[in-house]
Image (cartoon, grey):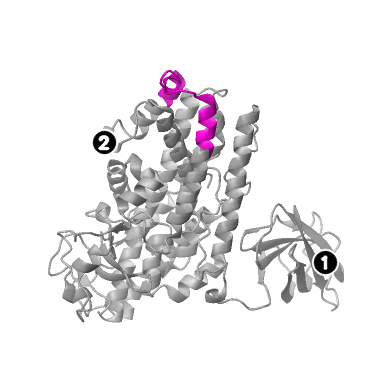
Amino acid sequence: MVQYKVTVFTGDRLNSTTLNNVFIKLVGTDGESDRTWLMGLKGVSKFKVSCPTSLGNLVLIELDKQSLPLFPEDAWFCAKVEVKSPEGDIYSFPIYRWIADSKVHRFRDGKGLGNCAHLKSFKCLFFTEYVHEHWKEDAFFGYQFLNGVNPMLIQLCTALPSNFPVTDDMVFPHGQCSLADEMKKGNIFLCDYKRLDGVKANTINGKKQYLMAPLVLLHKDPHDKLMPIAIQLKQTPSDDNPIFLPTDSEYDWLIAKIFVRSADFNEHQLNVHLLRTHLLAEVFAVSLLRNVPMVHPLYKLLKPHTRYTMQINFLARRLLISDTGNFTQFASSGGEGMFTILQRSVSSLTYSSLCIPDDIAERGVEAVPNFYYRDDGLKVWDIIHRSVQGMLGYYYKSDREVQEDSELQKWILDIFEHGFLSQAETGIPQTFTSVTELIKFVTMVIYTCSAQHAAVNSGQFDYAGWMPNTPISLQLPPPTKKGTTSEATMLATFPDVNVTVQGMATVWLLSKQSSDFVPLGQYPEDHFTEEIPRKILKDFQTELEILSGVIKARNKHLNVPYTYMDPAVVENSVAI
């Protein structure tokens, strides 16, 4: 445990003190403290706040005041709060105001580092400010395909799709290079939202909504930035489906990017997030509970990675994707379109795309610079794989032992039949024939339920908290010719205020760390009793801790830190 020394300065004016209970929470770049009671407040009061690990740089404090039973609300005037961190840093939070209600009040560190461009590590509100400042920029638009909440679509482009007739004159008007040459160098990338083609868009507030199926061409420039160079908003080329370019007018180009970001929201939520983490985690969990007894090593290994998954999916079905759910009512793909996208997503699901080493290779993105999802994900995968290899290698000494384990075979067959609908083309095994095959599959299960879910879930409010960067829906059709879009058109295209508020509230909730968060590799329930498995788990935790330190050190040098796959903040299961 580490301790933060908190000094609270109550004002010296008349009736500044309070008989109500006052609570504080410390919020840092690497986590937040528990809400702590400041017992016995008077002029200058000193307290200690204990945390399991360092919170990083403190960015704000939360104060709230609660009246006692039979006692009235009693206002409190707080002058300031000072906090000394375990590292010896002093943070000062100027307050100088009355707190009269029972709401949570947030106060920033007095150094005034509100501009996210100058912060090395920031979360939530600070990140949203950064997005607010940079959302129109091409470099930030491109960056999100690598390190936003949907890093799963971008792929190397070695030949243009036949339905995307981009020419050299369009994208390299000064003849400085050609598409063919840049493709040979591995500098051209494609994002194709073809799964959304023809999907019936929602009707919200009595108004028809619009959901496009764009194609986006990106170019790795000499500064290693991924820059969009062409956008076509519908799949079929035609005169009324122009290819938008960075050389177009400001609002022509911006509206094209906005339609892409809205399409990405829907592709991400239904395919990348719901199907490929939440629903698959449920498949793995249900099959485990149906087929594998508690004493089985597979049960012991996987049970912690299924924690709360059934409950959170029950809530998602009831509150998000039911007939009256938030997604159904307020997303452009809500309703009928949702089922179309999910059906297409299931049809395109493959085993290799769930295994990050295979997926990165298949998409040809091994060498893309500044791809932190890939860098961190591959390291987490390797650490999980080594642990699973040690654990299962301890229990299964030969391939024959795997083949003859009927409970293990029932588990994978149930997953194949009910999770992947007996589709052999997915590549999902129907049986396990070797220890190696079993190790890879179990690695994929643990990775999907932990690191992959964190990568596609935790940053939702970061990127969607500023609505224009990730609109949940759009209510005007895209332009059919260039030169017709203005700022007024753009504003009218954005969703209604109530839709924006519902969308922001939903992604805020989904991004929030669960109240009894358990990080990857921590096992509160002591299932394993043998010495060797316990040592393997301990080594697993040590490796994750080392990687966490490496990621934190790298992030100190990034304008936009990539934190989502830091093992310290990756949940052990799909629990939110």
Q: Is residue 30 magenta?
A: no
Whether residue 566 sits left or right of residue 174 in the image: it is right
Q: Which residue is mark 1?
A: 18
Predominant secondary structure, magenta span: helix
Name the residue rendered at 67%, 78% in the picture: 111
- Magenta stretch? 387-411
| Type of amino acid under label 2 | Glu
Point out residue 337 in the picture as x, y percentages from the top left corner.
Answer: 29, 50
Q: Which residue is mark 2?
A: 425
Point out residue 215 in the picture as x, y percentages from the top left corner.
Answer: 25, 62
Closer to the camera in the image, 52 or 67 = 52
State which quadrant residue 25 falls in: bottom right
State which quadrant residue 203 falls in: bottom left
Compared to residue 545, the image places residue 288 above or below, namely above
Q: Dot 1: what SS?
A: loop
| Type of amino acid under label 1 | Thr
